[in-house]
Image: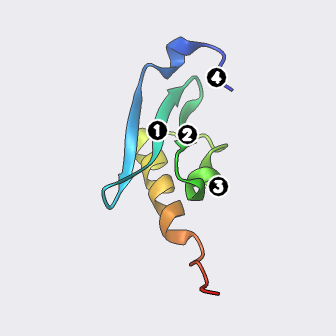
């Protein structure tokens, strides 16, 4: 996915309510989200223009996921 390790120099962990959910990583084309929580995988393939935009998208993905239904 990332062919040149030098492009991964700049990264920032993303937390939501104290939980580590993803990492925002700088790439040649902008910023990407590397998911840790499966709910953030929906935004993993997107390119973002800023670190703040990537972080906001990952946090929004957590709040947008469907609630787990009890059996």
Whichever of labels 4 and 1 marks the residue nearer the N terminus, that label is 4
Q: Secondary structure at mark 3?
A: helix
- Label 1 or label 2, whichever comes before in sequence order: 1
Label whose residue precedes the other's in the sequence (4 or 2): 4
Position of the N terminus by quadrant = top right
Q: Residue at x 59, y 86 (%)?
A: 70
The residue lying at 45 percent from left, 58 percent from top is 59
Do the CB atoms of the residues marked 3 and 2 lie less than 8 Å apart? Answer: no
Gap between marks 1 and 3, in whole Å?
14 Å
Residues at marks 3 and 2, CA–CA distance in whole angstroms = 10 Å
Position of residue 54 measured from the top left corner of the image (x, y, whole percent): 48, 46
Mark 3 or mark 4: whose residue is earlier in sequence: 4
Q: Which residue is mark 1?
A: 24
- Up-down: is 69 above or below 29? below
Location of mark 3 (residue): 42
Quarter of the image that includes the C terminus: bottom right
Tell whether label 2 touches label 1 (CB within 8 Å). Answer: yes
Query: Alpha carbon of mark 4 to alpha carbon of mark 2: how far?
Result: 11 Å
Coordinates of residue 64 in the picture (x, y in percent): 54, 70
Residue 56 is situated, as x and y percent measured from the top left of the image, at 44, 54
Residue 4, compared with residue 26, is above or below; it is: above
Query: What residue do we see at 32% from left, 61% from top?
Result: 17
The residue under label 2 is 34
């Amino acid at each position: 996915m990332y062919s040149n390790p030098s492009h991964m120099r700049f990264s920032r962990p993303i937390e939501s309510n104290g939980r580590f959910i993803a990492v925002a990583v700088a790439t040649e084309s902008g910023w990407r989200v590397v998911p840790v929580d499966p709910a953030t995988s929906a935004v993993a393939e997107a390119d973002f223009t800023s670190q703040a935009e990537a972080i906001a998208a990952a946090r929004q993905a957590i709040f947008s996921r469907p609630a787990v239904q009890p059996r």
